[in-house]
Amino acid sequence: MRECKNKGIKVSEDFVTYYIELCKLDPSRGIVEENITNREATHAFIKYAVNKLSDKNNRQVVTLKIQYVISNYFKTVDKAVQYYREKAEKKLFPFLMNITEQDKTCTVDKLYRQISIYTILASGLGNPEDKIVYKEALQVVRSIVDQQEMEVFPTVSNHIKQELVKSLVDLTTGIRLYNRSCKKGGHLIKNLPEILKRNIDIVLWKIQSCLDQSIYRSKVLSKFMQNHIRIRMVRGEHLLETLLPEPKVKSLWIQVKELIVVYRQWIKSSRDLLQEAKTIDEQRKATVDEYNLVIQKLNKIVVPNFYMNVTHVFPYFLQLSQIWKEIQNLIIRIQELCRIYSLLVNMVYKLPFSVPESETNKLEDWLLAHDQILLVDVPNPDIKVHIVTNEFKKNDLEFHGYCPWILINAHGALIQANIGLGVVEYKKKYYGFSSKIAANAFIQNPQEHIMRVILVARRQIQLIEFLEMRELLQEHIDFKEWMEDDEEEEIVAVSQGSQTDTHFYETKIVKKYYWNVWQKRAALLRAEQQKRLKNISSMTNKTLAQISSCTQTYRMDSCQTQTGVNAHTNTQKLVRFIYGLRGRKDDKFWDINLR
């Protein structure tokens, strides 16, 4: 957070925690407790994370923010309602303490005035500065508490006073609401049910229109991505490859692939928000029906201009007050939902979107002509192929209904599964595919495909929550990358050998090896100079014997073992010299023996 603050990056601590938790699901990143003391590794990860978060148009970060905001909204929406309630009570608490701490010298009129103003503010029914509103509230309070009871009010303890004032707020709210329904009061009380209905309709229309536009954009992006994907047969096996001839096309294809994840995540989140708005609308209807039912019951009980028994009517007034609070809570929920929606819409639609539209889908056209027959008879008892798929829905499939074969071979590209082609059941889990070729490839080795999808999700952490793979990654947290999707690691080989007196280890010498560029330049200069040189030499009988002859050899490698003790044995060797045969006229010679 300190690095983000120094660079002016505005991000919440909870989101950074969420980001780190997802990164920890990839063991290769080294974000474990054992590496916390490793300053180099920690600093490298901090630098990587800060660079990601600093880019406002980073599609991976935008996807993660959508996931975090939506999940946090559904976790804290009830707390938000409670927060607004507590905030209002906290603002009114000094006024409440002023009422409860009055001594016996306080006049009754002053108490009536203060309690009436407090009930208006606490209930939210009008403005106490309005004379009509204040007069109505004062009249209701006087009808509940007579003068003798108000004179006793200062004598009780403060705790009881607070409870009495809160009860007066609920009763006053219920009575004023009933007077409003009878058109005998309720001045400046807004029609919250109608306001709530109007706001819900507006939110539903906005979310639905934005959802339709996002689905359209997602289809355009998906067509562009699939038009650069080709399936071909290599050694009896179907392989998927991307046709990206130019660097610009490759860069655009990668951007489109990441942008598809953003829009797919936004579509998923929009549907959640749409369902939440519909749920609030259903709660509104049920609450309004309950409110009208209580009003009908009161109309049957209450007789105008007659005193009524409080035990008959007060429970209904309290019930009206509670129902009104529920309507207020629903308004807070729809306002919070609208705030989240506006935040996410601005975040998504700020990303650049410039993709040419295409009327055809080359991948789908190719599959229509060359797709395989789905394998049904599978020897593996853990695999079952379902041809009849009427009962299956997208939510029943793993990886949120996306094709795992495409995810693996297209580096995390999202193509929805076609449930009508068939569903493969593996270990009581269901998988859908975009083609029968993909399904047959999965049937051959399902566990390998699942592990490869895990590797893809580790590298592209925005897919973890979108594909609902958090639990799967946690189960295989110890799984190491025994396969590489993008590039194969360079194999480093070491030659070892041993030599004896009769079996020599021959060395390999690259005679034309230059270890730097200056040796190459020197060789070129020497070759250029030799073109202009001329060798002249003369030789006589005497100089012939003086010609030097040399041979360059390369020494053999020797393997030796050094110990702390040197032990050897010298034996006597017979050395014999014969002298006197060459250059003598006689045949005498000397035989010399050395021992």
Image: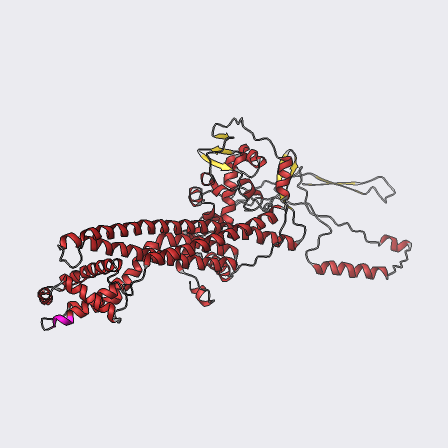
> Which sits in the foreground, 326 or 349?
326
Quadrant location, the C terminus: top right
Q: How many marks?
A: 0
Q: Along the horizontal axis of the image, is 77 left or right of 385?
A: left
Which residue is at a point 44% across and 33% down the rendered structure image? 428
Task: Relative to 97, say whether 382 is above or below.
Answer: above
Q: Position of residue 334 (x, y in %)?
A: 37, 56
Quadrant of res 176: bottom left
- Asked whether 465 or 334 is in front, the reply is 334
User: Magenta-highlighted stretch: main secondary structure?
Assistant: helix
Q: Which of 519 and 334 is in front in this view?
A: 334
Assess whether residue 63 is covered by the magenta stretch: no
373 relative to 21 in the view: left or right: right
- Please give the name of the residue rendered at 73% of the width and 48% of the height, measured from the top-left corner: 553
Q: Is residue 403 above or below residue 279?
A: above
Residue 526 at x, y = what percent?
Answer: 79, 60
Q: Where is residue 103 in the image (x, y as percent from the top left)?
A: 11, 71
Quarter of image, res 499: top right
Quadrant where the N terminus sits is bottom left
Residue 109 located within the stretch drawn in magenta? yes
Return the residue nearer the eye: 377 or 2. 377
Q: Residue at x 84, y 43 (%)?
A: 582
Whether residue 499 is visible:
no
Give above or below for 98 relative to 428.
below
In the figure, is residue 100 to the left or right of 569? left
Residue 6 visible (yes or no) = yes
- Tell me where the magenta segment starts and ends, as one range: 106-110
**Residue 393: percent from the left, percent from the top?**
46, 38
